[in-house]
Image (cartoon, rainbow, N blue to C red):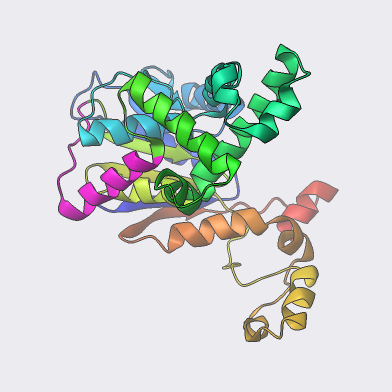
Amino acid sequence: MPLYTYHSNDLECLADALSRVIREPLTNVLLPEIVVVQNNGMGRWLSLRLATTLGICANIEMNFPAEFVWRTLRETLGIKDTAGKVSPYTPDMLTWWLMDLLSDPEQLSQFPDLFDYLRQGDELKCYEIARHLAGLFDQYVVYRQDWIEKWEAGQESHWQARLWQTLAARITIETSNPSWVELQKLFFAGVRAGTLQSPTKLQRVSVFAISSLSPSYLGVLQGLGELLDVYLFIVNPSQAYWSDICSQRDQVRLAVRDDTSMEYLDVGNSLLASLGAQGRDFIESVISLDYLVEAGEKFVDPGCDTLLHTLQSD
């Protein structure tokens, strides 16, 4: 099955497009409609918008990306739900796993740097370092999977690698679930072998107005697209193709490196070039996916009645 994309520079247009998708009933009408959003605020706004458009907003389940991917990986691999709905690898959950580990003197003694730092501290200091490390590990898992794979394979011996090995082993034992990286490897192997199970509680998923997803998350959505319909509703500030623009700072850096690719790049709109790098990279990653179908687009000219609308129109 293809992945369907809808582009717009207006959130209300995206929400209306989503409402048209939802109007088509699922095969099992009792199943919830799954929508993936970035945060609670967007989920609340979208619920109110859909209620206005459809007359009611019911049986729609709003998920965050990490929560959705965690559940989907286990369901498609047929892994029993023993770890709960929330992944133990989210920053909030990792914080408490790390707190438990770092509060154990025997475990802490294996990491001299941390031991020296926490030796004179209290529980608040332990919580602060656990929270900081949880945020780092979360970013590593999402964006530097190659590091995590090396750490879990024992190819690195520095303290962060050893701490991750101890942490992942404890989570795996206590939840009876493979590690986050191992789950992804099993999933992509299942995609290649065609052995994934269709989720019984999932028939369609819509990813709404998310500004950025890691390559691994996009890969999961693409693999899931072989089992069910996946819709990507993308906020795109420009109707024209803009992946080849770059900021003046980037042009200077490329010129210093004597990079020939700068010949194909243009500053274009300076504000979009300087502030839109993350969105540019995300949209470029999306349009490079296989089996992508553009389901539609609607771009609204904001006009020039205010300074903000003038900037948006430019």
Closest to the observer, 282 or 162 = 162
From the viewer's perspective, tell me whether residue 238 is left or right of residue 173.
Answer: right
Vertical side of 259 occupied by 221: above or below: above
Residue 96 visible in image: no
* Magenta residues (range): 181-200
From the viewer's perspective, tell me whether residue 134 is left or right of residue 201.
Answer: right
Vertical side of 250 occupied by 216: above or below: above
Displayed quadrant of residue 40: top right
Displayed quadrant of residue 34: top left
Residue found 56% across the figure and 68% down from its top: 241
Residue found 41% across the figure and 25% down from its top: 171
Residue found 34% across the figure and 29% down from its top: 71
Vertical side of 303 occupied by 209: above or below: above
Closest to the observer, 63 or 77 = 77
Identity of the residue furthest to the top in this view: 123
Residue 219, position as x, y percentages in the image = 37, 51
Closest to the observer, 250 or 83 = 83
Vertical side of 120 occupied by 178: above or below: below
From the viewer's perspective, tell me whether residue 290 is left or right of residue 18.
Answer: left
Residue 211, position as x, y percentages in the image = 58, 45
Residue 239, position as x, y percentages in the image = 58, 61
Closest to the observer, 118 or 219 = 118
Residue 297 is a magenta residue: no
From the viewer's perspective, tell me whether residue 17 is left or right of residue 230.
Answer: right
Residue 290, position as x, y percentages in the image = 33, 61
